Image: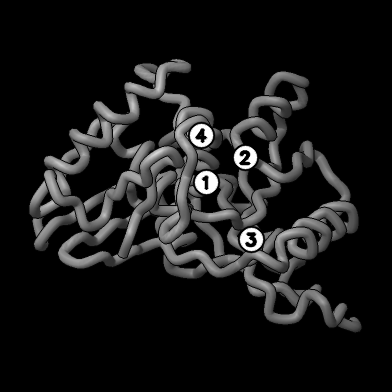
Amino acid sequence: MTLAPENLGNRVLVVDDDAALARALSVNLRAHGWDPTTAATGAAGLAAAATVRPDVVLLDLGLPDMPGLDVIDGLRGWSRVPIVVLSARQLGDDKVDALDAGADDYVTKPFAMNELLARLRAAVRRAAPARAEEPVVVAGELRIDLARRQVFRAGQEVRLSPTEWALLEVLVRHRGRIVGRQQLLDEVRGPSFSVETNYLRVYTAQLRRKLERDPSHPRHLVTVPGAGYRFEE
């Protein structure tokens, strides 16, 4: 069998609890030049994504430990890796929910292997210019693990509320760049946020108290007057 040159060495992470299907996919993917890794749970898939750094993720929505949408959300917290959903769920709402959560494509079971391979190739081509993210960001005494959603300060884990984490995550993903107030509100979409930008001041102040050595003179969570906020390493 002749291998398609564009596939050679591309890493694909298969997250599916159907062991027989995962094995069959691995055999077929390897035969077509891909480098597959499998995970049977959402937690294992998220951990593998942080270590393997796949070029594309093939994700089943019906996982035993967590909804597939939570896996998408976990990946999107730190990575733009393309995600192709592979699911037996054929309802339109499931597809819309997956795509809205951040999936790039949706393939229903049963499927034709040639079509699946074409979808994977297309997903990798579209994502090719932006594959340089790191799951762990170190800034001074802070260690921020975007894949596992954990923050450590001087070696001690810092507990953040969901809204505090969402705000930090957006700023860290755009580290070194100004993020406008409205963009922050749009991206965070936390239950405590509204169109009122004063929420940003409240939650930024809380983050500074937890993460900055001197909250009144922040080193990392910087306010840019009249523009927004910036995370500095």
How many marks the image carries: the answer is 4
Q: Which residue is mark 1?
A: 76
Earlier sequence position, callout 4 versus callout 2: 2
Residue closest to the eye, 63 or 136: 136
Give SS at disc 4: helix
User: What residue is shown at x 70% (from left), y 67% (from top)?
Assistant: 129
Callout 2 environment at 10 Å: few (<14), some (14 to 19), or many (20+)?
some
Q: Which residue is mark 2?
A: 102
Callout 1 environment at 10 Å: few (<14), some (14 to 19), or many (20+)?
some
Left or right of 80? Residue 199 is: left
Q: Amino acid at mark 2?
A: Gly
Q: Which mark is residue 23?
A: 3
Residue closest to the eye, 142 or 94: 142
Colouring: one colour
User: What residue is shown at x 39% (from left), y 17% (from top)?
Assistant: 191
Cα distance between the residues tagged 1 and 3: 26 Å
Left or right of 180? Residue 143 is: left
Q: Amino acid at mark 3?
A: Arg
| Image quadrant where residue 38 sits | bottom right
Q: In front of the other: label 4 or label 2?
A: 4
Residue 143: percent from left, percent from top = 24, 61
Say above or below: 103 vs 47: above
Earlier sequence position, callout 1 versus callout 4: 1
Q: Which residue is mark 4?
A: 187
Residue 30: percent from left, percent from top = 72, 73
